[in-house]
Amino acid sequence: MSQADTKPRGVLRRRLAKAFTFVLLAVVAVALFRYAGSVDWPSVGEALKGYPATQLWLAAGLAVASYLLYCGYDLAARRYAGHALSTPRVLTAAFVSYAFNLNLGALIGGVGFRFRMYLRAGIGAGVITRIVAFSIVANWLGYVALAGLLLVLAPEPLAGVASLRAWYLSAAGVAALALVVAYLLACAGLRGRVLRIRGHEYRLPSPTLALLQLALSSLNWLTIATILFVLLGREIAYPVVLGALLAGAVFAALVHIPAGLGALEAAFFTLLGNHAEQPQLIAALLVYRAIYYIAPLLLAILTYLGLETRGLQRGGRSGGD
């Protein structure tokens, strides 16, 4: 097939993807607007006031643990990519990029800020690309593993909502777990080989690093689910909360909504609507966003501005000398 034939197809795919995204955004917006109109907001306010300090501090501590686990992706990627940047600088770059990634999207946060901060630290673009690829694979590797386990061990809640037979979801779970095993086996048997996926190259890491990817990511997703589990008063079964989180995450990835706004809420209202009172559910999601999205973003903005200011000051002194 010639390049002239493939170009119109590529344009058509992009247009269809944009149309699909627009439709999903519209559906989410309409659903949330209708849902907001039925909410008893005074009761939500009372639920927010009712949170004990110990519960909030526990949720905040779990959020810190989750961010540290995510930063572990970049520390593991340091060995994978072969650079020698100090641990504090790696942690700073990972934290800032993750906070912006969650709130502004992967292209700006996960890629843009990583490139900006690593380039300023003297890391080459090729090495940064390997860091980004390693972190992305790590994040979704744990996701796929947990989703697979959940679909195999507890498919009933999702089956009821989606009107599907449980064995369909169990089969999907087995396929997801097989994908994870295939990746680990490929890393063991084809170590160092380059995979080409839709024009992007990814060099397979060592088996040890692949297992580290899986462990860090799985623990991170479990920790995030635990935050919501705690904020919901531990009254909903943990696997159900985890399933809602995973469903919301993939929905947010599909529609490319900054901060996953609406996607997570839609998943929780759908999957947990029969397990919790409406005010409690909304209050938990609001507190979760404040702790896991907004507070880290404010800290990341201050951190980034401080680094940029120091860089400008150094540049000014160098120019003066």
Image (cartoon, helix red, strand yellow):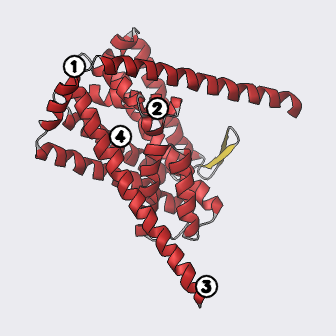
Residue 45, horizontal then vertical, whole percent: 18, 32
Q: Are marks 3 and 4 in contact (CB under 8 Å)?
A: no
Q: Residue at x 58, y 85 (%)?
A: 318
User: What numbered label is drawn on residue 252?
Assistant: 2
Question: In front: mark 3 or mark 4?
Answer: 3
Upstream in the sequence, badge 3 or badge 2? 2
Q: From the image, tell me which residue sits under label 3.
A: 319
Q: From the image, tell me which residue sits under label 4.
A: 221
Q: Which amino acid, mark 2?
A: Ala
Q: Residue at x 23, y 51 (%)?
A: 61
Question: In front: mark 4 or mark 1?
Answer: 1
How far is mark 2 from mark 1, CA to CA? Answer: 22 Å
Residue 154 seen by the camera: no
The relative height of residue 23 versus residue 290 in the rendered view (above or below) is above
Q: From the image, tell me which residue sits under label 1.
A: 275
Front residue of this view, candidates 312 and 244: 312
